[in-house]
Image: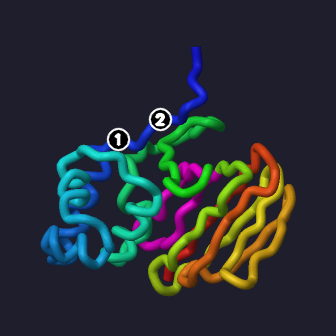
Amino acid sequence: MTSDVPPRLPLDWIAAALRRERTRAGLSLSELAKRAGIAKSTLSQLEGGSGNPSVETLWALGVALGVPFSVLVEPPAPAVQVIRAGEGPAVASERADYRATLLSASPPGARRDIYHLRAEPGPARESEPHIPGTTEHLIVSTGRVKAGPAGETEELGPGDYMTYRGDVPHSYEALAPGTTFVLVMQHV
C-alpha cells in the first residue's frame, strides 16, 4: 500500500547541516536565531534533530547563514539517483498548500538547485527574498500558477516558462487543483 503523504526530510540531515553551517559562519545559537527571526529554542531543537521545520523557517535560516536552502536539506547523494514522481524528501509550507521536493542540489562550483513543487488553490506561498543574486526559473508542468515578484506576477499554464529575481519578495499561487511546476534556483 502506498501513502499519499510524501516522506519528511530526515531531521538528522537538517540538524547536521545547521550545526555545520552555523559553525562555518562563526555564529552562536542566539545570533543565528536572531538573524533568522526565529526563537532560539526552535533553532536548538532543530540542531538537536527534533522539531518540524517549515519551508519558511529553513529559508530564513539559509538567508541568515548566506547559503541556499538546499544546503540545509541536501541528503548524501549516490552516483546515480532517481526520484520517482511523488517521492523524495518534501518540506511543506505552514501558510499555504505548497510542498517543495528538492530534486538536485547545486554541486561544488555550480550554484543552482532544482525543485519539483506541488501546490493547490488557496493562499499564495509568499516568499521572502533569498540570498542576494538569486534568480528563479519556473516551468509549469500541470495546472495553472500565478507567480513572480511582488507587483509583477504573471499567470502561467502547462509548458510556460518564467524567470525573475529571487532576491526580492515573490510568490506562487496555484490557480487550478493539482498544479505542479519545476523551479530552478540559480545563485551567484
Report crowding for label 2: few under 14, some 14 to 19, many 20 or more residues within 10 A (C-alpha): some
Q: Quadrant of the N terminus?
A: top right
- From the top left corner, tell me how far across and down residue 169 is, in percent: 57, 80
Picture quadrant where residue 165 is located: bottom right
Q: Report the front residue among 152 and 18.
A: 152
Question: Is there CB contact under 8 Å for labels 2 and 1?
Answer: no
Residue 16 in the image: x percent, y percent?
A: 23, 53
Please provide percent x and percent y for residue 144: 82, 57
Name which residue type carries label 2.
Answer: Pro
Colour mode? rainbow
Q: Main secondary structure of the magenta part?
A: strand
Position of 138 relative to 87 (above/below): below
- State the image quarter where residue 182 is shown: bottom right
The residue drawn where x is 34% and y is 68% is: 61
Vertical comparison of 63 with 78: above or below? below
Viewed as shown, does residue 99 lie left or right of 108?
right
Q: Residues within 10 Å of mark 1 (few under 14, many from 20)?
A: some
Residue at horizontal 48 percent and vertical 64 percent from the top? 106
Residue denoted by label 1:
10
Give how far across and how far down residue 142 sits, in percent.
Answer: 81, 49
Asked if residue 65 lies left or right of residue 153, the reply is left
Residue in the foreground of this view, choosing between 132 and 99: 99
Residue that numbered label 2 is attached to? 7
Residue 153 falls within the magenta-colored stretch:
no
Q: Which residues are magenta?
A: 98-117
134 with respect to 64 (left or right): right
Q: Residue 105 lies in magenta, yes or no? A: yes
